[in-house]
Amino acid sequence: MGAVELRQLVYFDAIVRYGGFTRAAQNLHVAQPAISSQIRKLEHELGVQLLVRSPRGVVVTEAGAQLLEHARAALSCVADLTTTAAEHRGVDYGSVRIGATPLTGGVELSRALADYRGRYPNVRLTLRSGLAAELIEALVQGELDLVVAPEHDFPDGTITLRRLSREKLVMIAPVHWDARPGALADILEEQFICLPANSGLRRLLNTAFSAFDREPSIVFETHSPASIREMVANGVGIALVAESIATAPGHPVSVFHLDGLPAHPPICAYSPVTPTNPAAARFTAELVTQPPLRGVVA
């Protein structure tokens, strides 16, 4: 019998965890043929069949189920070894993987990244953008170390949430807009620009209209709050956005504080309940204590 390789155990665990070869390859960012080849080699080394392909997916054999426990125990030991080594290195090395929505409100994330980079030049920093739900899921899956996003639902017991700064929902319109609305009821017939249907901003817009048993008329759907403002400035429609987006430097728009708008969720930092990355834990601690542009939420 030859030596069992660590990557073979990683692939074996991933196939079972994600429910198949294809999803395992996607999550590990590895070509599927490479995973299939390594699993065949692992089965040859161990002399038993671990997995059976079926029309309903991949089925773990009885031997595979027992050996999976040992594989996961081995992977856990390797993770502990890595964590211990990182603790001895401190925060001077390693990486910090950050996810952030386009809206970070009063949190000066770029300043925090620059300051941290200046103190720890050997730490690799990466920043990933996306919607809050997908970034939080990536955090749960261990693909990110920290997420900065508006407050959003997340799995209990796996994530720590810290509120960083307040936000407020406002309405924006082109500067030449003649109307002067004072309440949400005044704009029910207007055409809106918004983010995709799975975004927090779209949920806020839908919530606002639900008070009138109405649905908003979405004339244009775009990818970011900054793009919404650009479209509004060019007369495509009006929009509800965070106040920090409406008042930041950029395309000129008229800003309205309307009665009846739902509360905008605060900007938060999401991190694992039990941090295993010292560099990420230090960055998170510094970000949480950074003075925001707006009042900190208690």
Image: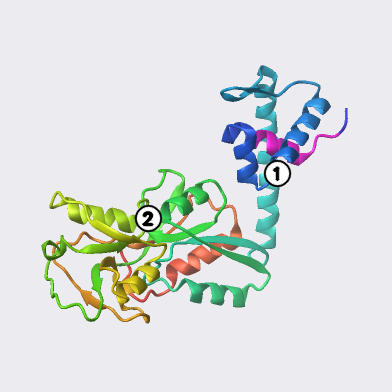
On the image, the x and y values in percent for residue 273 come to 48, 50
- Left or right of 255: which side holds 270? right
Q: Quadrant of the C terminus?
A: bottom left
Q: Residues within 10 Å of mark 1 (few under 14, many from 20)?
A: few
Instruction: Please report whichever mark, 2 or 1, sits nearer to the chain's N-terminal start.
Output: 1
Asked if residue 9 lies in the magenta stretch, the reply is: yes
Q: Identify the amino acid type marked 1.
A: Ala
Residue in view at x 37 percent, y 82 percent: 249
Residue in view at x 48 percent, y 48 percent: 137
Q: CA distance from mark 2 to mark 1?
A: 31 Å
On the image, the x and y values in percent for residue 143 come to 57, 51
Magenta extent: 3-13
**Which residue matches tag 1?**
31
Residue 244 falls in which quadrant of the image? Answer: bottom left
Q: Residues within 10 Å of mark 2 (few under 14, many from 20)?
A: some
**Which residue matches tag 2?**
196
Judged from the image, the secondary structure of the residue bearing numbered disc 2 is: loop
Residue 74 falls in which quadrant of the image? Answer: top right
Q: Nearer the viewer, residue 12 or 292?
A: 12
